[in-house]
Amino acid sequence: MRYFFLIIAILFTTLFPKQFEAEEMIKVKLVNYIGDTDKLNILLEGGYQTLDPTLSLKEGVDYHVTVKNDSLYLHGEGEKQKLNGSLVLFPETYDRDHAIYVNNRPYLGAMEFRIEENVIRPINQLPIEDYLKGVVPFEVFPSWHQEALKAQSLAARTYAYSHTKEEMDDTIHFQVYGGYNWNENTTKAVEETSSEVITFDNHLIDAFYSASNGGVTENNAHVWGGEAMSYFPIKKDPFDPTHPWEFTIHRTQISMNDINWDNSNWWDDVKEKDEEITLSMKKWLQNNGYPGDIKIVSIPRFELSEQQLNSKRTDKGSITVEFLHRLIDGTVLFEQFTLDDVRLNQIRPMIGGNQFKSYLISSLKCNEDIYTMKGKGYGHGVGMSQWGANFMGESGKSYKEIIQFYYPGTLITTFTK
């Protein structure tokens, strides 16, 4: 894969030297909108070339790529062709008139379609500034104050430059990237801060950010371990709107006494009470040693440690999940899984970040078979609060003041290769 994109990078800088002589290229694995699939639709706008001299795709033709028996196939114009390895497409001219539509979503630059665990995985490569124009409108609201959009542009650009050696994806695990779905306001913010990055001691920082810190920032070491960085202090944030949240989950999800075991379709008939949260639990269990079908029966234990960090965030907790586990041969087992006195960043993914929004927790109570958790904020709380940045902008603060508040002691510099 590196070989293919090395060729593409050379092609970009050879065909369009003035445009890319000072700009870094970045590659992004498309996961967020594509999902895991064995079929993708492709439509080309403008002329595109491939690395296979015998293969030519036409503009405006509906193609689709499929995978079968570890091979890729290209379908189009009534024909089916087996591909030799992956499919790599790059534009004859890099501009906004050349785009690759993947499942109706447009992307600029080059694209490789390869097999990854028996699904098709597109990898997009393009100049970093255009990548950012597809990031910022998906990380914040484009209607926000322009200074907040500029601050987000700097944070996203710094984060991207810090991860150019990695194969990032388009999800919240890195940065949400929506392709060539740009917005006028965010594009302006990216362009007006072109090449500006955040540094400390002459090095790029990991410019972490989250939606809302709940009124108090967090240090990086508390969340991910490692060395505590001075530009991620724990301090009150008067600009963050706190975002109080709450979720409930039933202790008993399925009553074993209510199951009609004589019914051959009992498995399909049985439903959990909190399907959104239990779906997250089932996916987590399946990815952690329990493949196959799962029904969550109960959560007999869910509690928090009294220990808190300096930011008043809760550090540890415990959870026990009881579930029915149907194996491939149809055998159904009653299983139990426990996380005992572990960091909450191990428990939160089980429940889901859309429900369990932060570690700034006000309370967790169990009343009449229902757990209720309340808290503030949305995300890890390290670095910039996106909502706080918007309120700072509306209060008359510049993007440079926003950066200095959330990353104190850092400098804004121009990135050079």
Image (spheres, grey):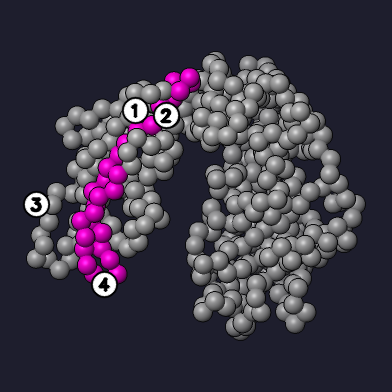
Residue named by callout 3: 257
Q: Is residue 307 magenta?
A: no
State whether residue 204 is above or below residue 34: above
**Which of the numbered marks, if any, corresponds to residue 107?**
none
Percent across and percent down for residue 376 are 43, 25
Hey, which quadrant is residue 407 in on the image?
Answer: top right
Residue 52 visible in rendering: yes
Q: Earlier in the sequence, mark 2 or mark 4?
A: 2
Magenta stretch in the rendered image? 309-338
Q: Nearer the viewer, mark 4 or mark 1?
A: 1
Camera-nearest label, 3 or 2: 2
Mark 2: which amino acid?
Asp
The residue under label 2 is 315
Marks 2/4: CA–CA distance: 41 Å
Measured from the top left, where is residue 3 in percent x and y? 74, 66
State the separation of the CA atoms marked 1 and 3.
33 Å
Q: Mark 1 and 2 residues: CB-CB less than 8 Å, in contact?
A: yes
| CA gap, disc 4 and disc 1 | 40 Å
Amino acid on which the number 3 mark rests in the picture = Asn
Circles 4, 3 touching at the beta carbon (< 8 Å): no
Say which residue label 1 marks: 305
